[in-house]
Each structure stands twice: as C-alpha cells, then as structure tokens.
Amino acid sequence: MDFIKKEVVLEIKAKKEIQDDKLPTQYSILPVGSSRTSAPTSENIMVGLDDILIEIMERLTGQQSKRLIIPIVSMGGIGKTTLARNVYAKPIIVEYFDICAWVTISQDYNVREILLEILLSLNKDESRESLRGMSEEELGEKVYKTPFCRKYLIVMDDMWSIDVWDKLKRFFPDKNNGSRIMITTRLSSLSFDLIGSDGFSMKLLDDDKS
C-alpha cells in the first residue's frame, strides 16, 4: 500500500533529521549471528530500522485477508518491544484495525492473567473487579467473542514458549478479514514454530564495525 509506505517514510525522515542533530548513527540491521557491543537508548533505537519498520507496516496492512502472525525476533535489550510499540501506536495502524490490544507475556506466564489483560486492553469498559470471578475458560470465551468478525491487532510482547500460543490461539478466530497477531520474542526457534521462518530478526552494529 503505497500511501502507507509514503507516510511512514516521511515520518522516518523527519525523525532522522531530529536524530542527526543529537547523535551519530550507531545502529543498523545485521544478519543473524552478528555481535553487539553496546545497548541502545530509547532515543536512538529506531535509527537504522527504516526498512524493517516499513516492512512490518506493509505486512500488517497488506491485502492478505487471512489472519497473519508476525514475529519480531531479537535478543533482550536490542529494541524489539520499542519497535513493536512504535508500530502499534501509529495513527495509520490505529485507524486500520477495528480493535487493538497489547499484552506482555513473561517467562513464567499465566494464561488467565494474559486473557484478563487482553480483555482490559480490548474493552475499556471492562474492569478487573467485573472480571475477577471468571475462570480461564470464561475469560477465553469472552476474548473470543470480543473481536468476533472485527479486524483486530493483538500484540504479544516477549513470548518465551510456543506453549503459550498453543493455549491462546483458539480464542483468536481467523475470519479472513485481515486480522493480525504481532509477537516479539528472543527465540528464533519460536518464530519457526509460529510461521516456519525467522520472522523479522533485529541485530545492532556499533561504529567500529559499520
């Protein structure tokens, strides 16, 4: 979708001009297996990620009607969550999807808590108090019904195991309406389990190796 790409490119250029006034460009995408020597800050994490940002945006808003899973893969501290949040907050994305939800999944996950957080994110009229007495299955059924027939974007941040998705996927129906699920993870093996490929792999490069 050219108009989306154009808007994203213009936004990136504007941010780059501001960034160039503050810091030298330090980071860029590298092939899997390259090393990293310094951690990024929130201000410069998006520098060098232009292509991957645009590609994710295009994947999210593409014409494929079937529900797609979009993994973003990197080791901890490189900025996959920052990238995902940057995409998630864009007005283009907010307007494109009927409903959106963000949930962080810890290594010691709790399916009931994940479903609860998704519900609270999907429906601002819900409260923890009103949902407190519901079982995991009841919460899952409510999640299933909430996005029913609507185009949804669900972000699952920092997933560690395919087991989580195996327990959650039945609550996110594929209605062939362009819905998307974006997952950030440290594990390339998880990306293979999800979609059979590496997904979007992020690596950083310092000045000495650029």
Image (cartoon, rainbow, N blue to C red):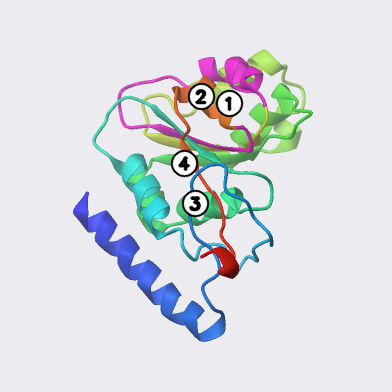
* Viewer-proximal residue among 133 and 180: 180
Is tag 2's residue or tag 4's residue first in the polypeptide sequence? 2
What is the CA distance from the residue labelled 4 to the residue labelled 1? 13 Å
Residue 35: x and y in percent read: 62, 51
Tag 3 and tag 4, C-beta contact below 8 Å = no
Tag 2 and tag 1, C-beta contact below 8 Å = yes
Write down the region rendered in magenta. 161-187
Instruction: Characterize the local packing of mark 2: few (<14), some (14-19) or many (20 or more) Cα atoms within 10 angstroms.
Output: some
- Which amino acid lies under the numbered mark 2 shown in the image of this protein? Phe
Q: Is residue 124 left or right of residue 90?
A: right
Residue 21: x and y in percent read: 50, 86
- Residue at position x 34%, y 41% from top? 59
- Residue at position x 65%, y 16% from top? 138
Is tag 4's residue or tag 1's residue first in the polypeptide sequence? 1
Is tag 3's residue or tag 1's residue first in the polypeptide sequence? 3
**Residue named by callout 1:** 189
**Residue named by callout 3:** 30
**Residue named by callout 2:** 192
Q: Is residue 186 magenta?
A: yes
SS type, badge 3: loop
* Residue that sits furthest to the bottom in the current view: 21
Q: Is residue 36 left or right of residue 68?
A: right
- Which amino acid lies under the numbered mark 4 shown in the image of this protein? Phe
